[in-house]
């Protein structure tokens, strides 16, 4: 019997009271891999990609997955096999994309601090586009392209000064943010770009933030970008690409209504479709978040003065979103029962008060050794993990149908400690 406990848990249903991913019990994976570990569903990743593809099918769109959300090469290859391009913010991410089989002509290079050495690597690969964040970066790209006797295809990233109505730490389109070129200066910077050797202007880029749950900021942005494209064309610039960024939010179980990918695509069509440009979309979180979970064990049940703590073997170094963003994630037991429910503070073993996943969280009664799943951890989970407290990086597992495989091994203590070198004089 399949039980659907929460709507946002559709990718990890209970089958015969056991939480599963596709046709595999998560408890079975836990027995083989040991907790804590991340687990991703290939089917969920593929479904998210198909939904984006359908949402933008009328706009000659290229879906460029934002690698920063989850950069595991197996995840990238899953998307590359579907035809996805990649939005990258470092040479390391470019190398991961290439290893996953992504063609350079489907790679868009974003980021505010591209060095000349990095620009050279990207130019030699002949990537699709540089999303240029500043006038100094534009000058560096021109200089390197001229030295290499080649041409860099560029779009300027425009900062439209739009309030994205999301967390302050993931808002990127306000005037006080470090990203992009102020829209008030865009015409002047495009004019400079047109005068530079080694530069081919082909597009406009915009990205206003992450985890947007309201389409209104997108609408405001698209109106401004459409107006800018018209003005640029009047000045003789051949704008053929509009990169609209990503930013569509996901359901973390907090009751927020999330716009559909279809509505997102229709909004872009409504305000940008008449321009005849190719659309680039850069989804990250909404491509992978709900395709992944963090599976963890209860080490201790600790009774406090006025509360009780579930102390897990997963920690903030494994999954930092709750500590960094005050993010709330659904947490469910792997074994579904109808036992009485209790309130718990759910915490990790790291020596920080901030190592807390949830406070006063209601769960079915738990005991030491129970397995829990922290939901919607596919994005900004493993990719933001660290080795704080000399804790090892945990495994990542990918499931397809009845098969599962470890796609990143748990690091050993020797590998971790041997990264350090002790000077001979010490």
Image (cartoon, helix red, strand yellow):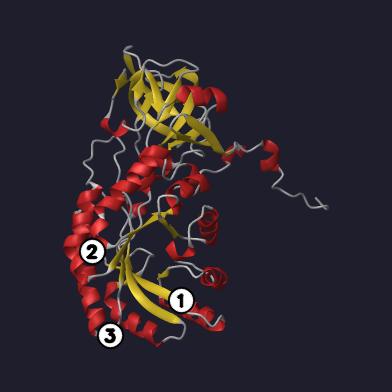
User: What mark, if any, has residue 236 been given in the picture?
Assistant: 3
To which quarter of the image does residue 407 belong?
top right
Q: Which secondary structure lies at badge 1?
A: strand
Q: Is residue 298 shown above or below 350?
A: above
Percent x, y of residue 281: 33, 58
Q: Is residue 395 shown above or below 371?
A: below
Mark 2 or mark 1: whose residue is earlier in sequence: 1
Percent x, y of residue 13: 34, 26
Front residue of 253/346: it is 253
Residue at 24% over, 75% down: 229
Mark 3 or mark 2: whose residue is earlier in sequence: 2
Q: Are marks 2 and 1 in contact (CB under 8 Å)?
A: no
66 left or right, relative to 183: right
Mark 3 or mark 1: whose residue is earlier in sequence: 1
278 left or right, relative to 20: left
How far apart marks 3 and 2 lie (CA) works out to 23 Å
Please indicate, yes or no, whether residue 338 appears anywhere in the rendered image: yes
Percent x, y of residue 1: 31, 17
Please indicate, yes or no, whether residue 109 appears anywhere in the rendered image: no
Name of the residue lying farthest toward the right: 424
User: What mark, if any, has residue 312 been given in the picture?
Assistant: none
Category of crowding for the residue at label 3, using alpha-carbon neighbours closer than 10 angstroms: few (below 14), some (14–19), many (at least 20): few
How far apart marks 3 and 1 lie (CA) works out to 19 Å
User: What mark, if any, has residue 152 been given in the picture?
Assistant: 1
Q: Of tags 2 and 1, which is closer to the observer?
A: 1
Q: Are marks 3 and 1 in contact (CB under 8 Å)?
A: no
Q: Of tags 3 and 2, which is closer to the observer?
A: 3
Q: Is residue 38 shown above or below 235?
A: above
Residue at 27% over, 36% down: 254
Residue at 43% over, 49% down: 79
């Amino acid at each position: 019997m399949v039980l659907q406990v929460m709507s946002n848990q559709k990718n990890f249903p209970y089958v015969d009271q056991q939480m599963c991913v596709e046709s595999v019990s998560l408890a079975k994976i836990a027995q083989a891999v040991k907790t804590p570990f991340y687990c991703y569903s290939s089917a969920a990743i593929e479904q998210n990609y198909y939904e984006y593809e359908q949402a933008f099918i009328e706009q000659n769109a290229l879906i460029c997955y934002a690698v920063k959300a989850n950069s595991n090469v197996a995840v990238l290859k899953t998307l590359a096999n579907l035809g996805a391009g990649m939005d990258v913010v470092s040479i390391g991410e470019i190398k991961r994309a290439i290893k996953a089989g992504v063609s350079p002509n489907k790679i868009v290079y974003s980021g505010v601090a591209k060095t000349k050495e990095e620009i050279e690597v990207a130019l030699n690969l002949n990537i699709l586009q540089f999303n240029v964040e500043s006038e100094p970066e534009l000058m560096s790209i021109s200089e390197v392209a001229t030295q290499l006797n080649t041409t860099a295809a560029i779009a300027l990233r425009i900062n439209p000064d739009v309030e994205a109505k999301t967390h302050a730490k993931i808002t990127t389109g306000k005037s006080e943010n470090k990203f992009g070129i102020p829209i008030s200066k865009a015409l002047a910077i495009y004019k400079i770009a047109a005068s530079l050797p080694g530069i081919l202007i082909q597009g406009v880029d915009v990205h206003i933030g992450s985890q947007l749950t309201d389409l209104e900021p997108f609408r405001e942005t698209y109106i401004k970008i459409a107006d800018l494209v018209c003005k640029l064309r009047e000045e003789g610039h051949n704008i053929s690409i509009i990169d609209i960024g990503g930013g569509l939010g996901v359901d973390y179980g907090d009751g927020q209504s999330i716009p559909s990918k279809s509505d997102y695509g229709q909004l872009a069509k409504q305000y940008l479709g008449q321009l005849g440009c190719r659309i680039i979309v850069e989804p990250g979180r909404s491509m992978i978040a709900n395709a992944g979970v963090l599976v963890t064990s209860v080490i201790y049940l600790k009774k406090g003065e006025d509360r009780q703590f579930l102390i897990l073997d997963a920690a903030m170094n494994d999954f930092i979103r709750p500590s960094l963003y005050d993010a709330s994630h659904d947490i469910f037991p792997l074994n579904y029962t109808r036992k009485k429910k209790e309130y718990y503070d759910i915490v990790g073993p790291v020596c920080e008060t901030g190592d807390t996943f949830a406070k006063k969280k209601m769960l079915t009664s738990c005991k030491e050794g129970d397995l829990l799943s922290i939901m919607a951890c596919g994005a900004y989970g493993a990719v933001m993990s660290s080795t704080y407290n000399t804790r090892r990086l945990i495994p990542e597992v990918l499931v397809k149908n009845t098969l599962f495989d470890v796609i990143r091994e748990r690091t050993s203590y020797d590998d971790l400690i041997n990264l350090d070198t002790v000077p001979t004089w010490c």
